[in-house]
Amino acid sequence: MEMRPNYLVLIEFFKGKFLGSKSPEIIIESCVMSLTIISYLLPKRLDILQALDFMLKRNQNSLINDSHILIQARMALFYGYFSDILFKDDEDNFKQGLEFLFKSLGNPAETQVVGMQS
């Protein structure tokens, strides 16, 4: 799936105050939260759902294992809304998402926010 032409649209957004001045963690957290908020719209848009599925398959490990605690908490919320429609053709990624949620329930106090979100 070639998505590079779509990035040209985003260039203008990076010139703006929010994306130009915030840390990558805050930008990712805001994007995941925004997708979660519009969760009721995504099942109706197969083109967006396919792009989201593709992006998550490529970046899931980084988002749930190697990321800031805030991003992990948002991903737990995100999976709560989308676990029934993501990775329908990829059992391994589906299992990885569920494992992340279940393992986060037993996390230590400093990462308790992820467990509470899960």
Image (cartoon, helix red, strand yellow):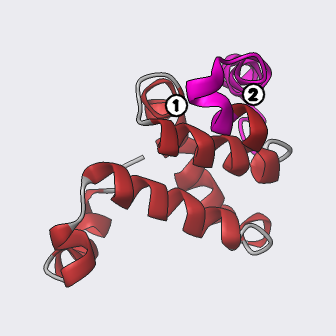
Task: Look at 74% across and 66% down and name the residue there.
Answer: 39
Crowding at mark 2 (Cα within 10 Å: few <14, some 14-19, many 20+): many
Name the residue that disc number 2 marks. 101
Compared to 81, does 46 lie above or below? below
Task: Look at 56% across and 27% down and name the residue there.
Answer: 110
Q: Tell me how far mark 1 sits from mark 2, CA to CA.
A: 13 Å
- Dot 2 falls on a residue whose secondary structure is helix
**Residue type indicated by callout 2:** Leu
Q: Quadrant of the C terminus?
A: top right
Task: Look at 50% across and 45% down and name the residue there.
Answer: 70
Compared to 12, does 69 lie above or below? above
Give the residues in magenta. Answer: 86-114
Q: Is residue 97 magenta?
A: yes
Can residue 72 be seen in this snapshot?
yes
Q: How many marks?
A: 2
Q: Earlier in the sequence, mark 1 or mark 2?
A: 1
Q: Position of residue 48 (x, y in %)?
A: 59, 64
Is 38 positioned to the left or the right of 12 in the image? right
Residue 33: mark = none
Based on the displayed image, in which of its 4 quarters is residue 105 positioned? top right
Is 114 positioned to the left or the right of 57 in the image? right
Residue 60: mark = 1
Is 32 positioned to the left or the right of 104 in the image? left
Nearer to us: label 1 or label 2: 2
Compared to 53, does 63 lie above or below? above
